[in-house]
Image: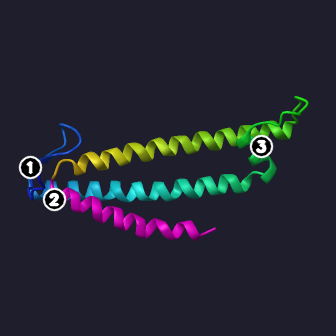
Amino acid sequence: MHFIFSDEAVLLFDFWRVHSPTGMALSVLVVLLLAVLYEGIKVGKAKLLHKTLESLPATNSQQLILGPDQDSTGSRTTSDNRTRLRWFLCYFGQSLVHVIQVVIGYFVMLAVMSYNTWIFLGVVLGSAVGYYLAYPLLNMT
């Protein structure tokens, strides 16, 4: 297999058939936006985790991650239960964002596996633009 410059391709699904230069340009734009979205989600996921850990009290976040102490009496306060529920919801949200990131990543990978040079360049450019736009957001508080 080798990369080809062509305005004809089948991308991701059988119904996404490209037969013209205009169709290829639109497909490159869609793949470019998917790559930008992938980079944005990657940075957003890291920022979400940071904010989640920041919002929980230090002792509670450590206990939630490591598990309850062995010498605890078994009674939990309402505040502890609320903190655990909040941690669970944040963790569940992180898991959903991760699944979305993986699905988009596989879509981008499969688009590149069409071995169309235009699609490949769209992915590379989209990844670069996405990183350029999203990376500074990590430093904002």
Q: Residues within 10 Å of mark 2 (few under 14, many from 20)?
A: some
- Marks 2,3: beta carbons within 8 A: no
Q: Residues within 10 Å of mark 1 (few under 14, many from 20)?
A: few
User: SS of the residue at dot 1?
Assistant: loop
Residue at image position (22%, 38%) is 13
- Marks 2,1: beta carbons within 8 A: no
Q: Which residue is mark 3?
A: 63
Of the residues tagged 1 and 3, which is closer to the observer?
3
The mark found on residue 6 in the picture is none
**Does label 2 or label 3 sit earlier along the sequence?**
3
In the image shown, does 98 or 27 lie closer to the viewer?
A: 98
The figure's colour scheme reads rainbow
Q: Amino acid at mark 3?
A: Gln
Of the residues tagged 2 and 3, which is closer to the observer?
3
Q: Amino acid at mark 2?
A: Thr
The mark found on residue 19 in the picture is 1
Q: Position of residue 130 (x, y in %)?
A: 39, 64
Q: Which stretch is magenta? A: 116-141
**Does label 1 or label 3 sit earlier along the sequence?**
1
Q: Which residue is mark 2?
A: 117
Q: Position of residue 111 (x, y in %)?
A: 24, 48
